Structures are given as structure tokens and as C-alpha cells.
């Protein structure tokens, strides 16, 4: 850039200038006993006086540099000065990060030191022209993310006010968080109620813009979250509402405060809440499309589906047994637009509790289904009944932390009811004595045996549309069965009826055991990769999820080309 940078000169800090380790401005009394000053001390004193005067003059002169640089840039403009302001603004928008709910703030507003800058403020620090362009571009300033720090207060909101004042009248996206709630680290200190008042000024400033809230995400203690609800104007454009105080699975939510906005009922489309009971959340559910929660009871989950006819994506974690706050529906709730459902049960539920949920929902448009059971036995009959009753075209199925004891073919039967499936996640933690009888391993054998989907009505088909397979396993499993899922790929690579399975991921929990892949399996994997298969093997327990394939290749002395 040929323009002059207003910060390119060396800044003279007279308070910190040093000659070696001796402060230039520190004078001293001559140690001669008779009170007279020796010749060298007099010279040093006179030198310091001259340096002080010179530095003062230099400081005064340096103040003139920015103005002169601006005049020079007008006569000798760089490319940024020749580009129309509208185009420069557009370029600036491409230069800054626009994510809202990242763990790192969009602008690093330190509660004590407002001089910490990044992104947008950095643009304004380059030169006066850049600052004028950045300050006059509202789209740079309608995103703000603030971290409250437990050890740094009182909160200073001057920078917040300046930031938002540049946003014009655009809708605002606001994220306020405390580090512990983002990292979910119980060892980090928390903001206590006794120090909460130090952050009230920032909250008040943000609340004064409530009529322009479009996206609001709060990852703070509940006593700070509730202050955002006490607003004086309607948030009519509110689209996203995320209120995520710290969640503790065993906490009693009966006495939790209600989520009520003082002067209006929000109508968001995207809601994420935890540590709130459904009956205490006062919003309009009719246009909700995305929902996330932790700790709901089964009856609350069913009621949520009943209240939200436009819901398309739903994630409900740590689901508890029913609490009878809402009546069980007499007939299954039929939902016509829900496409993506992720449910995780807290563990220990009896089959009757699981039946209470799955027997009372019918999801016609479901395409992505993920279910966590936390070591419960696979409720194959329940899931099969739910899938068949829904008559949905399922594209992705993932089941986590499930036990396959007493499976008796339930997994295979369930998967046969999903012929449209393209993505499959299966866990398996077989013992050394049960590998040959492990249901997922048997599914892999079946995939290999029925890898050709003929158009013959009498021919057997099994998951004919499968493209991606992920297997989460322990240290004991059969590599030969796993790799045979591709069947006749190498002998008939051009067969149009060959299953389109091209991606295999093995996520292995080694539990610190030696899980090196045997030599023949390594060679087979490399052969499959050369045939166009994308195959990844990861040690989940290793630092940074170590690549087991590369480790095994090194152990056996095998190159990428499969040569020893």
C-alpha cells in the first residue's frame, strides 16, 4: 500500500525511554561530600536537560504527522483511495469474521481494557481513510460478541455504545458469554451474584437496543440472563433466542424462574434453552423451526412437538423420565415437516418410558434421525414401529451408546426398514468372545454379501443407497468383516448396480491398548483407497485423534503405494 500509515513512525514514549538500563530522565545528586558537583555530573545533567527538550519537541512534531499524511494521500492516492467508498465497504465486509456463536468473541472486548481490538477495530486503526470507511459501514457493526470475565470488572460499556452506534438501524446479532459456559469446564471460576452488578451497565446498554434484536445468544448464569428479559420495547424482529445457563443433570428445575419477557411475547424461529421447564417458557411456538434443549422430561418433549407445527430441526438431550406435567396424547402426534431429530435419553429408562415417546410420535418428513440410549438395549421393535408408522424417507441414521445384548436380529430388521438410507453410524463394543456374534459385525457381512443391487424382484437387497458408513468401536473388532462391506467393488467396479458406498470411517476407542492394524488389513485398505474409497481410521483416545492407518503403515514399513 503506497498511502502513508499514520502509525508508521516510531512512537516516542518518554516515560519508558532507556539508554541501556539507565533512565535518561533520572538525575541524581553528586556524591561529593562538600556539596559541590563534579564535572561529569554537571555534563550529564546538562545532557538530560537537552534530551528532555528534544523529546518534547519531537512529541509535538509527531502530532502533525497524521494530518500531513492525509494531505499526501489526497495528492498521491493509493488504490484504496481511488476505489469508490461503496466498493471499499464491500471489501471490508469480506475481511472480517461474521460468525455469531463462536467460542471466541467477534470483537475481543475486554471488560477492563477497551484498547484490545481485532477485526473491525483493526480496520479503523490503519489510516484515517480506512477509519472513515469502516465507521460509515453499518454492516460491520451489527454483530457483537462480548465475554464477561469473572476476574475483571467493573464492566465498562463505552466501547459497546460506540460499537452499536455505528450499526445504523440494522437488525442486531448479540452474543454474551462467560468462558466457563462455553468450555463447559467446571474448574473455571463463575461470576457470583455478589459481583453481578458490575456487568449491569453493559446489559442495560444492550437491552436498550431490544427493538433491533435479531439474534440473541446468552451463555451466562441465570441471574444475568433474566436481566435481558426486563426490556421496555418489543423485539419484533427476534429470530434467534439462545439462553444457555450452566446445565447440571441432577439439578431440580421445579423452582427455576420463568422465562418471561416483560412487555411482549417473542416469536422466534430458532430457540435453544436449558435449565428451564417447558411450562415456564413463554414464547409463541407457532413459527418455531429450530429447537435445542437439555433436561426436558418425556412429556415435555411430546408437548413441544405438539406446540410447534413448523419445527424442522429438533435436538433434545438428557431426556428424563416423564414427570406428568403434560397429558400423554391419546393418539400419536403427527408432525408433517420435522426433518431432523436428535434425541438422547439420560440412561436407565425402562422400555415403557422409551415406548411413551416413540409410540406417540409420527414424523412424516423425517430424513435425519439420531438416538442416544446410554447403554440401554436396542429397542428394535419400538424403533421399527416408529419408522414404519412414519412412512418417512430416512437418509441418515445414527445410534449411540446402545447395547446389542439379546439383539436376535433386531438391528438387521430395523435397517431393512430404511432402504433410502445414505448415511449410517453404528457403535459396537464387542468382547473377545462375542466378535463373531456382534450384530454390527454381522451387518457388515451382509453389506458385503449383498453389494450388488439387481433389478430382479427375487434378488436380495440391503441398504442399496448407502454412501457413507461410520463405525464407532472398541479395540476388539474384525477388520476383515469391516473391509468386506465393499463386496465386489474391485472385481466389478463399473457395475451400475453396485452399492454407491464410497466413504468408510472407523473411530476406534483403544482404551490405551495396542490397536495397530494388521499387515494384511493395511494392504487391503490401501488397495481400496486406490479404487476410489475414502477410508479414515482414527484413534479416539489418542492425542489429537491419531491416524491409526498411518501409524500402522509405519509399524509395518508400508508406503502409500502399498509397497513394503
Image: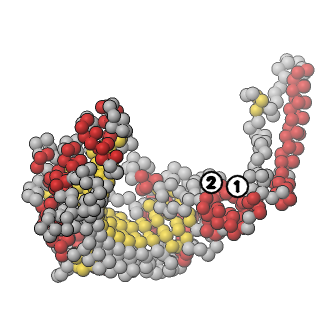
At mark 2, the secondary structure is loop
> Taking the image as drawn, is residue 430 in sight?
yes
Residue at image location 72% in from the left, 67% down from the top = 85
- How far from the left and from the top, in percent, is residue 125? 70, 55
Protein image colouring: secondary structure
* Closer to us: 250 or 298: 298
Callout 2 touching callout 1 (CB < 8 Å)? yes
**CA distance separating discs 2 and 1:** 9 Å
User: Who is closer to the viewer here, 487 or 477?
Assistant: 487
Q: Give the residue at mark 1.
A: 125
Q: Check disc 1 and report its element: helix, strand or loop.
A: loop
Q: Which residue is mark 2?
A: 117
The image quadrant that residue 562 belongs to is top left
Left or right of residue 501: residue 6: right
In the rendered view, tell whether residue 391 sits above or below residue 117.
Answer: below
Q: Earlier in the sequence, mark 2 or mark 1?
A: 2
Q: Which quarter of the image is occupied by the C terminus?
A: top left
Q: Is residue 515 visible?
A: no
Q: Is residue 19 left or right of residue 228?
A: right
Amino acid at each position: 500500500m503506497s498511502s502513508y500509515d499514520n502509525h508508521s513512525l516510531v512512537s516516542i514514549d518518554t516515560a519508558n525511554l532507556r539508554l541501556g538500563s539507565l533512565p535518561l530522565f533520572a538525575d541524581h545528586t553528586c556524591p561529593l561530600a562538600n556539596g559541590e558537583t563534579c564535572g561529569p555530573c554537571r555534563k550529564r545533567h546538562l545532557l538530560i536537560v537537552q534530551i528532555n527538550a528534544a523529546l518534547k519537541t519531537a512529541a509535538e512534531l509527531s502530532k502533525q504527522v497524521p494530518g500531513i499524511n492525509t494531505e499526501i494521500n489526497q495528492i498521491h492516492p493509493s488504490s484504496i483511495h481511488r476505489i469508490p467508498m461503496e466498493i471499499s465497504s464491500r471489501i471490508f465486509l469480506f475481511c472480517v469474521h461474521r460468525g455469531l456463536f463462536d467460542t471466541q468473541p467477534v470483537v475481543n472486548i475486554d471488560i477492563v481494557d477497551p484498547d484490545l481490538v481485532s477485526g473491525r477495530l483493526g480496520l479503523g486503526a490503519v489510516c484515517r481513510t480506512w477509519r472513515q470507511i469502516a465507521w460509515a459501514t453499518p454492516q460491520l457493526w451489527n454483530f457483537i460478541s462480548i465475554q464477561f470475565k469473572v476476574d475483571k470488572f467493573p464492566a465498562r460499556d463505552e466501547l459497546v455504545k460506540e460499537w452499536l452506534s455505528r450499526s445504523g438501524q440494522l437488525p442486531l446479532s448479540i452474543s454474551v458469554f462467560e468462558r466457563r459456559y462455553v468450555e463447559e469446564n467446571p474448574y473455571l471460576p463463575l461470576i457470583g451474584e455478589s459481583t453481578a452488578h458490575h456487568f449491569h451497565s453493559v446489559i442495560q446498554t444492550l437491552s436498550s437496543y431490544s427493538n433491533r434484536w435479531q439474534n440473541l445468544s446468552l451463555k451466562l448464569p441465570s441471574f444475568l440472563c433474566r436481566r435481558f428479559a426486563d426490556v421496555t420495547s418489543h423485539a419484533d424482529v427476534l429470530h434467534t433466542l439462545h439462553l444457555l445457563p450452566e446445565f447440571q443433570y441432577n439439578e431440580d428445575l421445579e423452582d427455576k424462574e420463568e422465562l418471561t419477557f416483560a412487555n411482549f411475547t417473542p416469536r422466534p424461529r430458532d430457540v435453544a434453552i436449558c435449565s428451564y421447564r417447558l411450562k415456564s417458557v413463554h414464547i409463541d411456538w407457532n413459527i418455531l423451526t429450530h429447537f435445542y434443549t437439555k433436561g426436558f422430561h418425556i412429556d415435555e418433549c411430546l408437548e413441544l412437538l405438539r406446540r410447534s407445527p413448523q419445527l424442522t430441526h429438533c435436538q433434545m438431550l438428557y431426556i428424563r423420565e416423564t414427570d406428568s406435567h403434560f397429558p400423554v396424547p391419546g393418539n400419536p402426534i403427527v408432525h408433517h415437516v420435522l426433518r431432523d431429530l436428535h434425541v438422547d435419553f439420560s440412561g436407565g429408562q425402562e422400555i415403557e418410558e422409551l415406548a411413551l415417546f416413540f409410540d406417540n410420535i409420527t414424523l412424516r418428513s423425517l430424513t435425519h434421525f439420531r438416538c442416544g440410549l446410554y447403554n440401554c438395549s436396542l429397542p428394535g421393535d419400538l424403533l421399527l414401529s416408529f419408522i414404519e408408522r412414519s412412512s418417512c424417507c430416512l437418509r441418515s441414521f445414527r445410534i449411540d451408546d446402545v447395547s446389542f445384548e439379546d439383539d436376535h436380529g433386531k438391528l438387521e430388521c430395523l435397517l431393512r426398514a430404511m432402504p433410502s438410507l445414505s448415511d449410517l453410524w453404528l457403535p459396537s463394543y464387542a468382547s473377545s468372545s462375542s466378535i463373531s456374534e456382534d450384530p454390527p459385525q454381522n451387518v457388515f457381512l451382509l453389506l458385503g454379501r449383498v453389494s450388488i443391487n439387481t433389478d430382479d424382484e427375487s434378488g436380495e437387497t440391503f441398504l442399496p443407497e448407502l454412501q457413507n458408513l461410520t463405525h464407532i468401536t472398541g479395540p476388539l473388532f474384525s477388520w476383515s468383516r469391516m473391509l468386506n462391506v465393499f463386496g465386489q467393488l474391485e472385481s466389478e467396479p463399473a457395475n451400475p448396480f453396485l452399492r454407491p458406498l464410497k466413504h468408510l470411517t472407523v473411530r476406534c476407542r483403544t482404551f490405551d491398548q495396542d490397536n495397530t492394524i494388521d499387515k494384511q488389513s493395511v494392504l487391503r485398505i490401501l488397495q481400496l483407497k486406490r479404487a476410489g474409497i475414502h477410508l479414515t481410521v482414527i484413534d479416539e483416545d489418542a492425542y489429537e485423534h491419531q491416524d491409526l492407518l498411518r501409524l500402522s503403515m509405519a509399524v509395518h514399513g508400508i508406503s502409500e503405494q502399498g509397497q513394503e
